[in-house]
């Protein structure tokens, strides 16, 4: 092993850390033709050419022989090498990258008998392949094929064992090191992608929550406003005093709606279950529906009370809008660590599908680990059961 080969060996080993960064930008990962994944940094393609500094060892043999034929032969081979390298830098698909690396490997093997230092071309292939292929099997198979081809060629053509042996050794060292590095980069990319997906899901969930809250706050209140406005219109001719009273209540409800929207924005969506039941009494009374609450609301945690309060609000809103009922019964039952709420009316029932309000109610209940059911065969019966964690 001469000093030049030792120098080449030590310098080519450093390609393990350097070619990995070059190869991340030689369209090797984006070589699939797909958009670049997160975690693979964009770099100036011109920067990739800095790694050609290691090709200086290709010049050792022509300098030693120093004759025109070898220089011409070297110039042709080196020009082909630079063309293939440039193709890798700007390759847009994985298939192109595979073909170019295969061409570089063939070129290195073909030139190896004339210039043992050109084994570095094989090392370039070993350095790049981990960043082109996502498959560990493909990378390991490629490294094995490169080492096997170099060994067979060296044995059959009686090439100096140090020359082809070190080329095979560097292929293994550089390829294995870059394989570990590429896997770490891909893992970071997947982790970043997962964080982005979680962030997006959180945004979607927040939008859905806001939509449910606005529906529960405004849907109920606007229904009351419409109801009282219609009643005032009917009473305008025969009972002006009552009509003025209803219009006054419309103003109060409108102001209340504005306050509720502000509270929803601040996160205070409910005044409590008792206040919601009292509001339900007033709303149903204005709609000509008699509300009977058969039991007192239990003591619940703020989260549980808020969910049941919004459920009562949605149920009352649906009765006013759609039920055409005259009676409504509400019942609370607490047993075995669970609280159940049942709201029934004697209206027309016939619920075919859940709207946004009922769907939002179900999502809130199930979010607390509870159960929600609705029966519309005779009137409408809504049954909610939630586990009580704290009082």
Image (cartoon, rainbow, N blue to C red):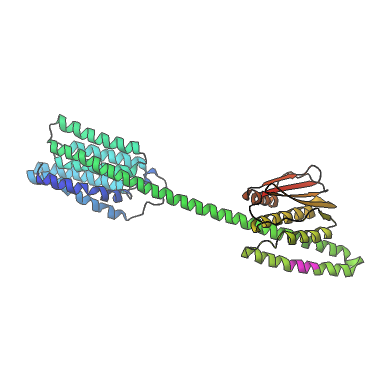
| Magenta span: chief secondary structure | helix
Residue 349 percent location from the top left of the image: 79, 46
Q: Which picture quadrant has residue 47?
A: bottom left
Q: Quadrant of the C terminus?
A: bottom right
Q: Which picture quadrant has residue 128?
A: top left
User: Relative to 231, does residue 120 appear above or below in the rendering?
Assistant: above
User: Residue pushed farthest front?
Assistant: 336
Q: Residue at x 47, y 52 (%)?
A: 195
Residue 234 percent location from the top left of the image: 87, 62
Q: Which picture quadrant has residue 135?
A: top left
Query: Observer-nearest residue: 131 or 98?
Result: 131
Q: Is residue 106 left or right of residue 387?
A: left
Q: Residue at x 69, y 65 (%)?
A: 260
Total marks shown come to 0
- Start and end of the magenta stretch? 249-254
User: Relative to 317, does residue 6 appear above or below in the rendering?
Assistant: above
Residue 250 is inside the magenta segment = yes
Q: Is residue 156 left or right of residue 190?
A: left
Residue 298 percent location from the top left of the image: 72, 55
User: Relative to 324, does residue 233 appear above or below in the rendering?
Assistant: below
User: Residue pushed farthest right?
Assistant: 238
Q: Is residue 74 left or right of residue 193?
A: left
Q: Residue at x 17, y 40 (%)?
A: 166
User: Residue pushed farthest top?
Assistant: 156
Residue 66 in sight from this viewpoint: no
Residue 358 is inside the magenta segment = no
């Amino acid at each position: 092993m001469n000093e030049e080969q030792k120098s080449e060996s030590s310098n080519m080993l450093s390609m393990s850390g350097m070619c990995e960064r070059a190869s991340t930008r030689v369209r090797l990962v984006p070589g699939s033709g797909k958009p670049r994944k997160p975690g693979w940094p964009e770099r100036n393609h011109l920067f990739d050419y800095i790694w050609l500094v290691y090709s200086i060892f290709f010049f050792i043999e022509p300098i030693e022989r120093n004759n025109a034929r070898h220089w011409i032969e070297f110039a042709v081979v080196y020009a082909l090498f630079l063309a293939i390298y440039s193709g890798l830098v700007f390759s847009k698909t994985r298939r192109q990258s595979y073909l170019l690396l295969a061409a570089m490997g063939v070129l290195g093997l073909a030139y190896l008998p004339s210039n043992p230092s050109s084994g570095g071309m094989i090392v370039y292939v070993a350095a790049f392949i981990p960043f082109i292929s996502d498959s560990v099997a493909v990378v390991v198979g490629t490294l094995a094929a490169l080492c096997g081809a170099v060994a067979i060629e060296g044995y059959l053509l009686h090439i100096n064992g140090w020359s082809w042996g070190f080329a095979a050794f560097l292929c293994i060292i550089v390829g294995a090191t870059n394989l570990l590095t590429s896997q770490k980069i891909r893992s970071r990319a997947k982790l970043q992608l997962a964080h982005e997906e979680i962030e997006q899901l959180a945004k979607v969930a927040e939008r859905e929550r806001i939509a449910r809250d606005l529906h529960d706050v405004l849907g109920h209140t606007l229904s009351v406003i419409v109801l009282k406005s219609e009643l005032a219109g009917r009473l305008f001719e025969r009972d002006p005093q009552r009509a003025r009273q209803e219009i006054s209540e419309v103003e109060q409800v409108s102001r209340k709606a504005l306050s509720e929207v502000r509270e929803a924005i601040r996160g205070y969506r409910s005044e409590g279950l008792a206040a919601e039941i009292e509001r339900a009494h007033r709303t149903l009374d204005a709609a000509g529906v008699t509300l009977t609450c058969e039991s007192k609301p239990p003591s619940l945690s703020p989260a549980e009370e808020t969910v049941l309060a919004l459920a009562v609000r949605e149920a009352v809103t649906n009765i006013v809008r759609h039920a055409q009922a005259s009676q409504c019964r509400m019942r609370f039952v607490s047993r075995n660590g669970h609280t159940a709420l049942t709201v029934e009316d004697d209206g027309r029932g016939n619920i075919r599908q859940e709207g946004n309000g009922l769907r939002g109610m179900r999502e809130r209940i199930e979010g607390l680990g509870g159960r929600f059911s609705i029966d519309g065969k005779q009137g409408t019966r809504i049954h909610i059961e939630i586990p009580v964690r704290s009082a």
